[in-house]
Image (cartoon, rainbow, N blue to C red):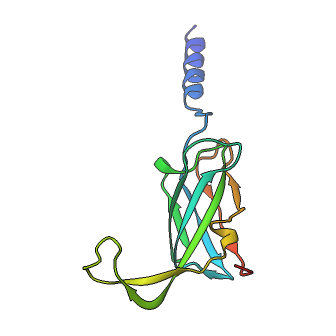
C-alpha cells in the first residue's frame, strides 16, 4: 500500500511539472550582415499568419540579441521576423522629443527591406522548448 501511494505521488508530481502547454521562453542569437556582426539594431517577432498571440523583440548589440523569458516568444508558435541595423552617418540632428536639447547622431537603417519592413523571415519556436537560440545570417542584395 505504501509503495502504491508513493508511486501515485511521484506520478502526480511528474505530471504537474511537465508544463506541456505553450509558454514564453528566452530567445538569443547572433545577427550578421555580409559576414559582419550587426553593431546596433533591433529584432521584432510578430505572430506569423495563422498564429496568434503577442509579439516581442529586443535590441541587437555587437551582433547579439537576447529576449528574456518573461516576454519571450511562445513555444509552438511561428513568428515573422523583422531586423533593422543602424549605422551612424556622422551628422547630428535635433532630438524630435526635445528639439531645444542636445542633438543626436543621425542613424540610417542599412539592412535591406527584405529583412525589415518587407521581411519574409519566419522562425518557429519548437513545442516543449525551454529556451530558443536562432542565428540570422543576412546577405546584401537589392534594398
Location of the N terminus (image quadrant): top right
Residue found farthest to the right: 141
Determine whether 88 is above or below 73 in the image: below
Query: What residue is shown at x 59% (from left), y 16% (from top)?
Result: 8
Which image quadrant is residue 34 in?
A: bottom right
Q: Is residue 58 left or right of residue 117?
A: left
Of 5 and 116, nearer the camera is 116
Q: How many marks?
A: 0
Which image quadrant is residue 36 in?
A: bottom right
Q: Is residue 14 visible?
A: yes
Query: What residue is shown at x 65% (from left), y 67% (from top)?
Result: 135
Query: What residue is shown at x 58% (from left), y 28% (from top)?
Result: 14
Determine whether 85 is above or below 1 in the image: below
Of 92 and 44, nearer the camera is 92
Residue found farthest to the left: 100
Of 131 and 100, nearer the camera is 100
Location of the C terminus (image quadrant): bottom right
Percent of width and height locating residue 114: 70, 70
Determine whether 70 is above or below 89 in the image: above
Q: Is residue 136 visible?
A: no
Residue found farthest to the bottom: 90
Determine whether 105 is above or below 119 in the image: below
Percent of width and height locating residue 6: 55, 17
Percent of width and height locating residue 53: 58, 42
Percent of width and height locating residue 127: 67, 42
Query: What residue is shown at x 55% (from left), y 26% (from top)?
Result: 16
Amino acid at each position: 500500500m505504501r509503495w502504491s501511494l508513493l508511486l501515485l505521488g511521484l506520478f502526480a508530481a511528474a505530471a504537474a511539472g511537465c508544463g506541456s502547454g505553450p509558454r514564453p521562453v528566452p530567445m538569443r542569437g547572433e545577427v550578421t550582415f555580409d559576414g559582419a556582426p550587426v553593431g546596433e539594431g533591433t529584432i521584432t517577432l510578430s505572430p506569423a499568419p495563422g498564429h496568434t498571440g503577442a509579439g516581442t523583440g529586443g535590441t541587437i548589440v555587437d551582433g547579439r540579441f537576447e529576449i528574456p523569458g518573461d516576454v519571450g516568444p511562445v513555444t509552438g508558435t511561428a513568428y515573422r521576423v523583422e531586423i533593422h541595423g543602424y549605422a551612424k552617418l556622422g551628422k547630428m540632428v535635433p532630438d524630435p522629443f526635445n528639439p531645444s536639447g542636445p542633438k543626436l547622431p543621425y542613424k540610417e537603417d542599412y539592412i535591406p527591406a527584405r529583412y525589415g519592413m518587407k521581411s519574409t523571415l519566419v522562425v518557429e519556436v519548437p513545442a516543449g522548448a525551454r529556451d530558443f537560440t536562432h542565428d540570422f545570417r543576412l546577405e546584401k542584395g537589392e534594398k
